[in-house]
Amino acid sequence: MRRALVGLVVGVLAAGSLLAGSAQAAPKPAETPAQKPAGPSPLAPATTIRLNQHGYLPDGPKRATVVSASTSATPWQLRSSTGAVLASGVSTPRGVDPASGESTHTVDFSSYTGTGTGLTLAVDGQGTSHAFDISAGLYNTLRSDAMSFFYQQRSGIPIDASLAGGAAYARPAGHLGVAPNKGDTSVPCQAGVCDYSRDVRGGWYDAGDHGKYVVNGGLATWLLVNSFERAKRAGTDGALGDSTLRIPERGNGVPDVLDEARWEMEFLMRMQVPEGRPLAGMAFHKIHDANWTGLPMRPELDSQQRELHRPSTAATLNLAATAAQCARVYAPYDAAFAARCLDSARRAWTAARANPAVIAPDSDGNGGGAYGDATVSDEFYWAGAELYATTGEAAYRDVVTASSWHTSPGAFTSFGFGWADTAALGRIVLATVPTGLPATETTRLRASVTAAADSHLSTMSGQGYAVPLPSTAYVWGSNGQVANNGIVMAVAYGLTGQQRYRAGSIEALDYLLGRNALGQSYVTGYGEQASRNQHHRFWANQYDASLPNPPAGSIAGGPNAALQDPVAEEELAGCKPAACYIDDIGSYSTNEVAVNWNAPLAWLTQFAAETSGDDGDGDGGDGDGPGTPAAGCAVTYGIDSAWNNGFTATVTVKNTSATPVNGWTLGWSYPGGQRVTGAWNATVTQSGTAVTAKDVGWNKAIAPGSSVSFGFQATFTGSNPAPTGFTLNAATCT
């Protein structure tokens, strides 16, 4: 990857080189493991039939990989829990998979659209697979569990047993200054950094230790908020609304995913250098213990001194980007908080522009990861894009359009975006959030997203396990990179409605949940062979039987060919890149958890749970059949931004009847000479003053009481009056 970090070795604490997109290095514990990891050896999976052990969506792709040296097609059967044959066929030989070195076949049973639990796949000569389900609600629970990870990683608040999944996961608040904690309410700087203390309580513990890092926390926060913004554009945000998660803030009228992200956003703003101090407006890079925290260690029992590390331009731009996003997305729910976010974003941007080369050193790796990042032009692009999307101000637009990242083909990489590679985030913002950019420019930006998605699909097609990652990209945190590339494909689906992108993003989940070289589900609690000994100070049952294993929905970092911890070096010598993983608490370079890996898992599972490949016309496809009549409908029309002779608008269509709408065509007339030049989430055409907007397949069904939204860009001359009436499938709307 384009940047790497180097850790330090301190006594018995070991930290290795870190690659971009990774979590920080963690220490090797002094203790000897109480037991070997449960389950089969990571180099000898229990079955040669590798599939998503959690299951499949009825209308999604359903493929498995079979390890076999045969060059001939092999018969297979899909069987019910009672042994009945539901579907059958023959495999497709694929040859040698480059990342695993295994000869593979593909079994494709996507044509089966039924449902069931306890299903298995039997392949001649290969035995029977792990059991799995096919269900439309397959990802609902995983979505909730992946989000619960963040609540349970919260610092500065008691973790409630009733919310966390039982008494084993409950704990007092960590790092609030209650003995033996030194606390995060008055944290001094490292020597020579500053001569004052800051209240930096709250936020999420970044990974398996007790550190909190602005660049990693910023990326994770952005992903959670972006997942809500995506769902709101698609009209599926109800699934992310208030009281949908197990968090203390449920019932406050604010979507729960935004409540969770706010816990970290408040911390990020506390990390900003206050006015009147040197480097005012910048953000401290990180806060953690003075030395590496021992393992195991409950947060409330951590007695070490906490330290603020010097500000950095990268951290400051992370704050600017996430705070600008906050200002836009939170405005309908808490205008005062949104205003505070925007003020913080502006101050951070100004400070970063004044201090463009304050780089976090790679040498600052004692007690926590260095997160060094010598190239911050991509962070400037990302932060500028967010500020422009929120404010529409020319000063931010000019910086964004002048950036080399605005046109660079390297904004999207095969390795995926990450905390050190953020240009793709700026592209995604500009491609999906309405701005005042010319229509041709917006079209080009969207084409760059779909081109990146097509590149990931091409990579997947050349592999036995359909991983959106090259064989050279099994680095620290590879599972996070797989999920991030899955997000790029999901964004492309939202822009185009083309099913291949939805299928690709869902197959990224297949990999994470068991369709991989180890037949290993990397997500705790999901699958018969799932990770359970991830590297963590509190979820440390492998070292202390009184402590729990990680909760369901926690994802491991994944295969790392560099073998950057002593356990991996000893147990995985000679491994092929895709097999360099071990479910051992001591293997921090393959088996740690981190917020920037669980965030894309949560994003993807939310996407998978909320989208459908069926257009609602009953044929399982995305055809152009006529829409059902609308018995009742309401339309909201709003202009998002306007300039000289152009504007962008969002239209929301609500089904106010008791009958589902299966396919929709919305019509209206423009009284003022407006002309639509481009659209997203709908196909919009215009003849004279008459405008027609049609669904794009994936958003064709509108359930009673539900809504869909789409947007467009248009020009006008003179005045720009709103339409006076709308029709949905020829019925008049209110």
Image (spheres, grey):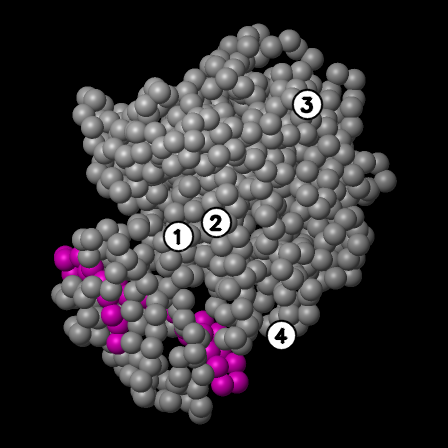
Label 4: how many Cα within 10 Å (few below 14, some 14–19, many 20+): few
Magenta segment, prevailing SS (helix, strand or loop)? strand
- The residue where tag 2 is placed is 457
| Distance between mark 1 and mark 4 Cα atoms | 37 Å
Label 2: how many Cα within 10 Å (few below 14, some 14–19, many 20+): many
Name the side, left or right, on which 496 lies relative to 36: left
Residue 497 in the image: above or below residue 516: below
Comparing marks 2 and 3, which lies closer to the viewer?
Answer: 2
Earlier sequence position, callout 2 versus callout 3: 2
| Distance between mark 1 and mark 3 Cα atoms | 38 Å
Residue type at mark 4 is Ala
Pinpoint residue 257: horizontal percent, then vertical percent.
43, 45
Q: Is residue 75 magenta?
A: no
Pinpoint residue 713: horizontal percent, then vertical percent.
44, 75
Residue type at mark 2 is Leu
Name the side, left or right, on which 702 lies relative to 677: left
Task: Read off the magenta span.
Answer: 639-667
Question: Can you see residue 463?
Answer: yes
- The residue where tag 4 is placed is 394
| Distance between mark 3 and mark 4 Cα atoms | 48 Å
Query: Mark 2 falls on what kind of element?
Result: helix
Q: Are marks 2 and 1 in contact (CB under 8 Å)?
A: yes
Query: Mark 4 falls on what kind of element?
Result: helix
Q: Nearer the viewer, residue 132 or 554?
A: 132
Pinpoint residue 75: horizontal percent, then vertical percent.
30, 29
| Distance between mark 2 and mark 3 Cα atoms | 32 Å
Q: Which quadrant does the C terminus fall into?
A: bottom left
The mark found on residue 565 in the picture is 3
The mark found on residue 500 in the picture is 1
Earlier sequence position, callout 1 versus callout 4: 4
| Distance between mark 2 and mark 1 Cα atoms | 8 Å
